[in-house]
Image (cartoon, rainbow, N blue to C red):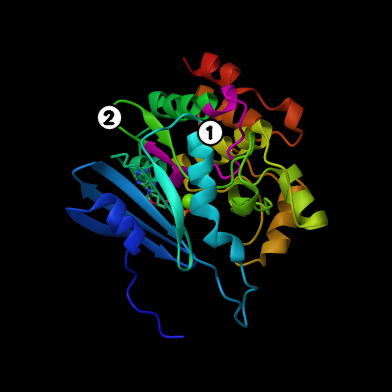
């Protein structure tokens, strides 16, 4: 099917009346825009279903993700947002957060023979952003380096489309089927392999944060599996706990190692991580 360049749905144009707009990301099932308007500066997320092809099965949930995220953000007390439906799926807008993400910010640490150490204060900012969510009784479910935006005042944790912890309108809800395997805790990978679904938990978020800090600081994954292995083989390796050595020096390295513990109860809680880092 030929695809025309993505456009903002009319309902969103009507709601925001953009003075400028920029397409940030366009991938299967989702587009994200940066929009400026008299109302403010926003990220607009637009979802539509992924049709089945020879390589992949249809994924109708991507159409629901923006509305689900909007409902979660509202539950969490955010007021400067809106969400709704358009012809092909759902959309939301939410405050735009300026700044690099964790992976971008720590790029200098990953250069060969780099002598630049990952900054503890940056790690602390990520821990605090996730801790705020956990303190409200929610688990994120999709913690990864691109989802921490390191702003000038504080770090923001974005993409709450898969978060679990409170009521989500039934029409916009869908099961959690795991996240990016690099950041998936062993118990999540096991559950996805066995049942096709899993339950996001704070402990699994702590694992994903450990894996995020590790990859951002070193470029290395937490677990041992070939890059080109099929996803089920990668999940099998994660579920079986084929860990790699954590090569991050000092307190941060020891913490990441503990956060990547196979048994959820062995992982530190975020208040414990904060205390050790500060
Ligand atoms: N509130 C926001 N502020 C700034 N950038 C954002 C915001 N929301 C999304 N983005 C940008 O869009 C990208 C994709 O957004 P994300 O919420 O992860 O959508 P998806 O559900 O498609 O993964 C992010 O990695 C980030 O670059
Ligand atoms: Mg995302």
| Residue 217 placement (x, y as % from top left) | 45, 39
Q: Which of marks 2 and 1 is in front?
A: 1
Q: Which residue is drawn at 81% across and 55% down?
A: 195
Q: In which quarter of the image is residue 273?
A: top right
| Residue 257 placement (x, y as % from top left) | 62, 32
- The residue identified by callout 2 is 152
Say few, some or many: other residues with alpha carbon within 10 Å of mark 1 (under 14 / 14 to 19 / 20 or more).
Answer: some
Left or right of residue 203: residue 84:
left
How many labels, in total?
2
Name the mark on residue 75: 1
Magenta residues span 133-149
| Residue 254 placement (x, y as % from top left) | 59, 26
Q: Nearer the viewer, residue 7 or 112?
A: 7
Task: Measure the C-alpha gap from mark 2 to mark 1.
Answer: 26 Å
Does residue 147 appear in this view? yes
- Helix, strand or loop at label 1? It is helix
Mark 2 vs 1: CB contact within 8 A: no
Q: In this view, does 235 lie above or below 149?
A: below
Is 146 one of the magenta-colored residues? yes
Q: Is ligand 1 less than 8 Å from the beta carbon at label 2?
A: no
| Residue 34 placement (x, y as % from top left) | 28, 52
Q: Is residue 164 above or below residue 13?
A: above
Q: Quadrant of residue 216?
A: top left
Q: Nearer the viewer, residue 114 or 133?
A: 133
Q: Which residue is drawn at 65% across and 31% down?
A: 202
Q: Nearer the viewer, residue 39 or 207?
A: 39
Is 198 one of the magenta-colored residues? no
Q: Is residue 192 above or below residue 138?
A: below
Name the mark on residue 31: none
Left or right of residue 102: residue 174:
right
Q: Residue at x 17, y 53 (%)?
A: 19
């Amino acid at each position: 099917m030929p695809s025309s360049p993505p456009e903002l749905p009319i309902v969103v144009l009507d709601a925001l009346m953009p003075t400028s707009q920029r397409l940030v990301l366009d991938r299967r099932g989702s587009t994200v825009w940066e929009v400026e308007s008299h109302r403010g500066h926003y990220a607009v997320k637009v979802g539509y279903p992924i049709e089945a092809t020879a390589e992949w099965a249809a994924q109708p949930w991507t159409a629901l993700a923006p509305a689900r995220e909007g409902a979660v953000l509202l539950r969490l007390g955010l007021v400067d947002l809106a969400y709704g439906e358009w012809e092909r799926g759902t959309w939301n807008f939410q405050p735009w957060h300026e700044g690099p993400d964790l992976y971008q910010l720590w790029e200098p640490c990953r250069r060969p023979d780099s002598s630049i150490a990952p900054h503890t204060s940056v790690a602390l900012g990520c821990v605090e952003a996730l801790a705020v969510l956990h303190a409200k009784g929610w688990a994120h479910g999709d913690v990864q380096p691109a989802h921490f935006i390191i702003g000038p005042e504080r770090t923001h944790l974005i993409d709450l489309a898969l978060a679990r912890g409170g009521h989500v309108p039934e029409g916009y809800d869908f099961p959690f089927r795991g996240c990016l395997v690099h950041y998936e805790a062993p118990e999540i990978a096991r559950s996805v392999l066995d049942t096709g679904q899993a339950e996001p938990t704070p402990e699994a978020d702590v694992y994903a944060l450990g894996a995020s800090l590790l990859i951002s600081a070193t470029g290395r994954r937490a677990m041992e599996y070939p890059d080109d292995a099929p996803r089920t083989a990668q999940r099998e390796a994660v579920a079986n706990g084929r860990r790699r050595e954590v090569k991050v020096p000092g307190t941060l390295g020891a913490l990441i190692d503990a956060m990547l513990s196979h048994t959820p109860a062995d992982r530190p809680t975020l208040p414990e991580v904060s205390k050790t880092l500060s």
